[in-house]
Image (cartoon, rainbow, N blue to C red):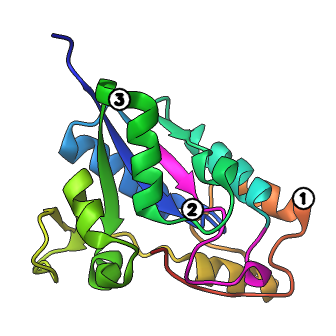
Amino acid sequence: MARRRRVGLLGGSFDPPHTGHLWMARRARDRLDLDEVWLLPAYQPPHKGADGLSPWRLRREMAALLAAEEPWLRVEPIEGERGGVSYTVDTVRDLQARHGEAIAFVLIIGEDSLRDVEGWKDPDALFAAVEVAVLARAGCAAATGRPCRLLAGETHPAQSRRIRAAVAAGEPPPWLTPEVAAYIERHGLYRRRAAGGRRP
């Protein structure tokens, strides 16, 4: 029997994608023996209104620029194709239906997302359907009784809201690859707003 490919799923608004996302993807790949990591730009995150979010096409294109850093990293556009509010459990189900037994998916989340997981759509079904790995600070105790793999250690300080705030203030934005920084400049993004949020 052929070995099932192991693919990590890293979701988010990616508004903008930054070196912290790249760090998470690399760390998960190394620690979890993943063949690939797929970035999942949310079409409409449940936690924020559409008015405070850059258009999905722009966020997908920025994520693709970030993914170009590594051959094992790519953008999966399924949430944009589906449209509407992006719920993680729906995305996992759709990807599993599309790829069948060929791929074993691993959902990659941060410690902050683990604390919020009880507010997600159908968390019971999500944790039953897919392996979940949590990237957390050293000394973190899992904040849920749900089964997950805790990868404790250093975390990356990057925050999209701080990048947006820097651009809005006319300051050099931290934690961006040159390609993403040039894209933001070219499209005039974040000049008049600096909103934050988390992905359910």
In the displayed structure, would residue 50 be above or below residue 85?
Answer: below
Label 2 sits on residue = 18
Nearer the viewer's eye, disc 3 or disc 2?
Answer: 3
Label 1 sits on residue = 186
Label 3 sits on residue = 100
Which residue sits at x=46%, y=33%? Answer: 98
Does the residue at mark 1 contact the one at mark 3 (Cβ under 8 Å)?
no
User: What amino acid type should be assigned to the residue bearing mark 1?
Assistant: Arg
Q: Residues within 10 Å of mark 3 (few under 14, many from 20)?
A: few
**Distance Cα–Cα, label 1 vs label 3:** 40 Å
**SS at mark 2 in the image:** loop
**SS at mark 1 in the image:** helix
Which stretch did the figure color magenta?
37-54
The quadrant the C terminus occupies is: bottom left
Which residue sits at x=32%, y=24%? Answer: 102
In the rendered image, residue 184, in percent from the top left (x then y), is placed at 80, 63
- Please tell me whether residue 38 belongs to the stretch shown in magenta: yes
> Which callout, 1 or 3, points at the residue further toward the start of the chain?
3
User: What amino acid type should be assigned to the residue bearing mark 2?
Assistant: His
**Distance Cα–Cα, label 3 vs label 2:** 31 Å
Q: Is residue 91 left or right of residue 138?
A: right
In the displayed structure, would residue 106 be above or below residue 21?
Answer: above
Which residue sits at x=29%, y=71%? Answer: 123
Q: Is residue 71 left or right of residue 121?
A: right
